[in-house]
Amino acid sequence: MSLKVKLISCISLFMLMLGVLVIGVFAATQQQISMQGNLSFVVPDKSLYVKNVRYQEAGGEAVDIESFTPGYINGSFNMDLTALETEENAHGSFALYFDIINTTDIQWAIVDVELPTALTSAGVSASYSGIIPTNDLTDTDSDGYKNFDANTPIDGSLILTITAPNSSSVNLEGIVITIDEYIDAAVQVTSVSSSGATTDTYTDLAGGVAIDGSVDLSGIEFATGETTLTISMTSLSAKYIKNIVSYDSGTVNYNTTGTSGTLFVHSTSLYLPQNSSGELSSGESKDLTIYVNNNTSSAKTISGLKVSFEEKESLLQKDTENKYWYVEMGTVMGQTQSEYIRWKYIASVDDSSGSDVATKYTTFDADTTPTGKGYFYLETNVLSAIGRDGTNNMIEVSFNNDWTRTSARAGHQTKAEWTSINANDYATSNVRRYINGVDSYDAYKNPSGTSTYPYTYEPDGRESNMYDDLNIDTTNDLVYEKIVARSLGELYKDNTNSTTNPNDVTYPSDLKDGDEYYQEGHEDAFWLLSYYEVYQLTGGSSTIDSDSGRVWPTGSANYYWLRSPNSVFSVFAYIVDTSGFLNFDFVDFHSHAARAAFKFSI
């Protein structure tokens, strides 16, 4: 059954509504909670029989509600709560347990609880849990529902928990509970939102539906321009769930640059966290964002557009063929799906002394997973990938400006008060801003006639940052959450061009006051490898070694920047060239790559 059909079935057959629930929460001196009113369910069948209802204060035992009369959830079920009152409830919360016999061969669960705005604005919240499994009853009535008697045990309980502030009196009214078929699956979609779609087909995905297989998005029509589609979901698996956005080959222009007449599909990378209980309500909700750039003249549907799921034992993966460990963070657009970006494990790290001591990872063992903390750097060659803006020069940026030269592609704008800043200082560099999510132009130019101090520069080229180019979601990405930042001061240590005994680079005195972003204590999530680190951790036999560990993998090679300055000429910073040689180049060249690294808590 498709997702859309499933939802229609839910609306027509399986919707369970809590029609009237008036519960007063009074936080007087005695901290009492009292409830009054009628609890009514309306469902046009006899799928579920409520045998008992129990009430539980926070921290207390669940007790039977004596005024409750058992019955089917078919429109006639009614429970009087008028006589129910508790004392000394200082928690401001309680739970109702609905003990249920299942008369069908379908598993059931609460998938949504809707509170009126008046309640949420008053600080009232609701949560839910529980699954009603099937049973072994075989005798059925004329309508196909299972027969049972007074001695038949319940199959499970659905639990509704209400929490309200102790300091106020709150009238709970108009709560709507939705029960749907529970699928023993990987993912539960909790909500879907969009900006830019010309139809609202995507709304059919909302409502807390458990997904087995994939989410079909092929019916959505995307207007001209950019559409952002956000799918919130929760894992039902004890493993990590990797989300993959795919589409039919030829649907998108994955190898075509420019914007006119193109259709691009990008998505953020998303691993859902583990959910050991498998309960619908206990998983941590995460957002998958899909970007559709429709640069044609009319609205389009995307053939085969869907989200599918893969279970993973760990965030740390292994490439047994190429013999390395890696994590995945960010994506680029591929021919048939969003391709996850790999970050290769290159060293274990001991930071217990306050400074990092990195040890090169040398012997791959597929049966022994690395633990602790480690350094990772960008392994997937993304230089030819097409970004959301239709360009394929992503992560190519100038290191910084060179104010001693007047080339047309001079670098990053400087400040007049910075008199001790060299063009190759990493702290103020353009490349540092780019890899840490600060919008930067790939280069800056020195306008004609302004080559005298104070130097001013105008933007040149495209404006972006690595987070946008590589679709890294800092709010929802589990790998990003586990990054351990490094301070600028630490990044200046052991930063000279030595392969065996590097010295610290003096931190610019002009940066020690003022903007926190430029101070030694500022911590960066991403950074460039130093001359010493790239030699010790990814190469190792000589300073001009072309060891494959230092060469950009697969596809066309390119120079990539290191954070180490040339100590003789301030217009040069160190690079790794296309042969893997350690070299240096002018800082204003904008065609070199920003091959970022990070420290990760495995």
Image (cartoon, rainbow, N blue to C red):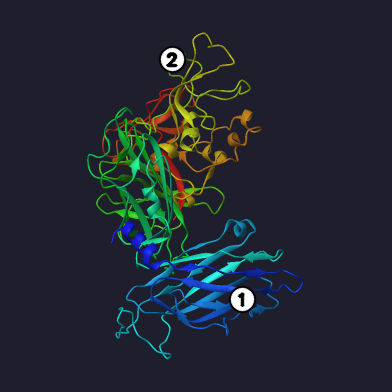
Q: Residues within 10 Å of mark 2 (few under 14, many from 20)?
A: some
Where does residue 393 sit, x and y in percent of width and height? 35, 30
> On residue 59, which mark appears?
1
CA separation in Å, label 2 and label 1: 72 Å
User: Marks 1 and 2: in contact by CB < 8 Å?
Assistant: no
**Which residue does the numbered mark 2 point to in the structure image?**
407
The quarter of the image holding the C terminus is bottom left
Please tell me the numbered disc located at residue 204: none
Q: Position of residue 21 (x, y in %)?
A: 57, 69
Drawn side of residue 482 relative to residue 218, left or right? right
Q: Quadrant of the N terminus?
A: bottom left
Q: Position of residue 228 (x, y in %)?
A: 41, 42
The residue sitting at 31% across, 45% down in the picture is 339
N-term-proximal mark, 2 vs 1? 1
Check disc 1 and report its element: helix, strand or loop.
Answer: loop
**Is residue 556 visible from the viewing direction of this image?**
yes
